[in-house]
Image (spheres, coloured by chain):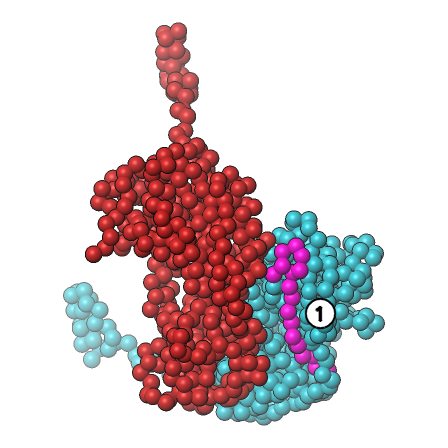
Chain colours: A red, B cyan
Amino acid sequence: MKNMIAKIASVALTAGIAQTSFAIPPAPMPTPDEQAIDAATKDMFAWDIIQGLTTEVGPRLAGTEAEARARRWAAFKLPAMGFANVRIEPYKMQTWVRGEETAEVLQPYPQKLIVTALGNSGSTGKAAIQGEVVYFANLQALQAAPVGSVKGKIVFVSHNMKPAQDGSGYGPFGQVRRIGPNIAAKMGATAIIIRSIGTDNHRVPHTGNTNFEKSVTPIPAAALSIPDADNLVRMFATNAPVQIKLILTPKFVGETESGNVIAEVPGNNPKLPPIIIACHLDSWDLGTGAIDDAAGCGIIAAAAKHLRDTGPRLRTIRILWAGAEEVGGFGGKAYAEAHKTEPHGLAMESDFGADRVWRVDFKLPESAKALQTKIADRFAYLGIQTGKAEAGGGTDVEPIIEAQHLSVIDLQQDGTHYFDLHHTADDTLDKIDLKQLQQNVTAWTVVLMNVANYEGDLSLAPKP
Amino acid sequence: MKNMIAKIASVALTAGIAQTSFAIPPAPMPTPDEQAIDAATKDMFAWDIIQGLTTEVGPRLAGTEAEARARRWAAFKLPAMGFANVRIEPYKMQTWVRGEETAEVLQPYPQKLIVTALGNSGSTGKAAIQGEVVYFANLQALQAAPVGSVKGKIVFVSHNMKPAQDGSGYGPFGQVRRIGPNIAAKMGATAIIIRSIGTDNHRVPHTGNTNFEKSVTPIPAAALSIPDADNLVRMFATNAPVQIKLILTPKFVGETESGNVIAEVPGNNPKLPPIIIACHLDSWDLGTGAIDDAAGCGIIAAAAKHLRDTGPRLRTIRILWAGAEEVGGFGGKAYAEAHKTEPHGLAMESDFGADRVWRVDFKLPESAKALQTKIADRFAYLGIQTGKAEAGGGTDVEPIIEAQHLSVIDLQQDGTHYFDLHHTADDTLDKIDLKQLQQNVTAWTVVLMNVANYEGDLSLAPKP
């Protein structure tokens, strides 16, 4: 037989025909890891979750009935995907809801403006606020304004935020929204309008939370769409006094219920603390929360699903679909409080859209160097670089990370286009790119398969 | 001296140095044509007009006070640019204005929808219409629906319009908007919502006129933003009954004044009929009408300005900034009626945004072949091809073209992105690309300089 095969092979070779298929041993069965990665590259679970949340629930503002529907949707969906120990963990919160919102320029060039109230904004009442507008090119200019200069007036603050791949403009420029209203209120302004914290050029203003000190009475605070802000700046360039009329009627509806949804892929070794992976289930009320953050919930659940489908690993993967992230991270805080006595091994979060993972950051003990190298090496094949920053998690896992000094891995997503959509009505399903979403699921699957079987100690010493 | 120059040149040549500058005669004075083209390539007049109209007037719905402000703005601006015989020619029209507009899905997946009323839409009244929605994938499906199938229901019609460089999708797919509501009303529907006639993916619905037959009572008719239409289609895919609630309270306010603004660059030879060049001054009320059609007004006036600044030509160039184009072409009709006894030489219009001219179409007498060739040859240098279609003008000049069998030249603009913005709140100044706008002004200047000095007869025989 050997001779015969050799003879045939020799003939095939001589004839120049590649008759070699029978001479190659059959491919080995793919390992569970290979299977999981292969499935992740073609993943449709993440898309299915994003489509479901955006279509079957839609906008899901924290503390509202819509967010409760999202929890019920999740509590039905996650067991159907094969996850274990699915449960809703409720908590109470003070809930703010949007009202009517209109604005118009009265002078010098009468026309409507498109605005949206910031979370925690005060109300103008139905009767509208009307008055002179004082323009500041940025927050620093407002902060430098003389005492009394905006008293009884409406403040308009612009800024110069530009897109950045790592989303790093949001920290500094986002301060216009986060603290601008409180500063204007303390200076005696009757209301504040800001250039949307965003990078698009559409008539879709960006909402988002603002915060007033307890001693400060909230004033009406709204974001203008970016083309509207541009238009207003052009009006100021004429040096004519600018007057606007503003109606915003948001309100606090009192204490309502919110909640976290938890699901697990149980591990084989109950002595190894679980890996906690998080996203948030609530969204702002203007869009359907596709990139923020149905995408994150889809990505982490899909990766956990691929891991699960290839058989059990050592550590439990715990999925946290947190509530009320947008309005103050109440879900993450509630989770940390409820689970403070359970040890955790490592925390991760996905909450920056659905564009590709381009960088990985770590915060691991020195002893886990080999784990880090293994992930980084595998990521190099996927075009994902290793960053130099220390991983930090995100709003939903920060409280438990802080309480337990947890290890963290951050899969940093490309944020170049994120602030085109963030907190706007435009945050809808059609903005998700399937290929990039699948790359996220693949990267997450790679990390989970490595950390779920990691037997070493992942705990970090408390920071001095 | 000759010898010396020859010697120096020879030495320079030998030394390999290009010492030839003193041997070249001084550049001749640029011709008026060259001056005009050079100025057009750097034009800022068009931008200035678009910025002025969008900032200092803003939205300017036909028949409203805002459109009247636009006329006053124009009547101030055009003489300031040096144009002669500037005048407002008023006429009366029936005026429709937008009211409140909200929509929400009640079943199966409660959430808000973003809608806007179509021009001439009926009103739901403050009390809202609520009811089952019947979905049709396109207008043909609605037309084929059995008698009685939509009686007492709300019709939803989608379509499959895609971008096209020549904008050719708007004719057939736009029928959903133009005649869909009338068809649904005749079938006994209580209201109709359509997928916006557009090609974007933003939460900015596209308005536009619809028309009801005189014998048909207008029903409430609105456009959904494209992401909202997508969402609704996904809900229908679940086969669950879909119910919505719709409030639209537009109304007719009766007869009001609209008007055309006219300005001229007088020619030297009063025996040669003028060239009429048009755009429209009115806009829809959602955006500030930058691409539709402040851009057209900017382009034609800027080109006429460059021609004017180089000295008089033979024929008069008459600029028509027409009123009330969007709502029925009333300005163009009023112009044709008011000027029916005056001869015209040629008509042109700019009303397709501000992206580059990529093609030129002609409708000229056989005797003007040389003129056509001259323009086409010059355009070849600008990368503008000659089309095979017959030029048609546009809504503002069609009535006078038809009445007087006028010659026409169409400078076709690239419409690939036009229907991303058309008739939406997103039609704002920031969407104008200065370089492409300047290319438009250059192309128009080239045509005007050729036709303004054309002494031949431009009249066409009436079509049989």
Q: Position of residue A316 (x, y in %)?
A: 40, 40
Along the line of sight, the residue nearer the viewer: A86 or A187: A86
Q: Camera-side residue: B393 or B195?
A: B195
Residue B225 screen position, x and y as percent: 60, 64
Residue B423 in picture, x, y percent from top left: 60, 71
Which is nearer the eye, A68 or B84? A68
Q: Does the magenta-highlighted stretch encompass residue B101?
A: yes
Q: Is residue B84 above or below residue B111?
A: below
- Magenta span dominant secondary structure: strand
- The subunit carrying tag 1 is B
Question: In which quadrant of the rendered view does residue B332 lie?
Answer: bottom right
Q: A433 above or below B76?
A: above
Is residue A439 in view from this perspective? Answer: no
User: Which residue is under mark 1?
Assistant: B128
Q: Which residue is painted at 56% across and 46% down in the image?
A: A76
Residue appearing at x 43%, y 76% in the figure: A194
Which portion, as a residue range, is magenta? B93-111
Side of B160 relative to A24 (left or right): right
In the rendered view of the protein, which quadrant contains the C terminus of chain A?
Answer: bottom left
* A384 relative to B267 in the view: left or right: left
**What residue is shown at x 65% (from left), y 75% (from top)?**
B100
Q: Secondary structure at mark 1?
A: loop
Query: What amino acid is labelled 1 in the image?
Result: Ala
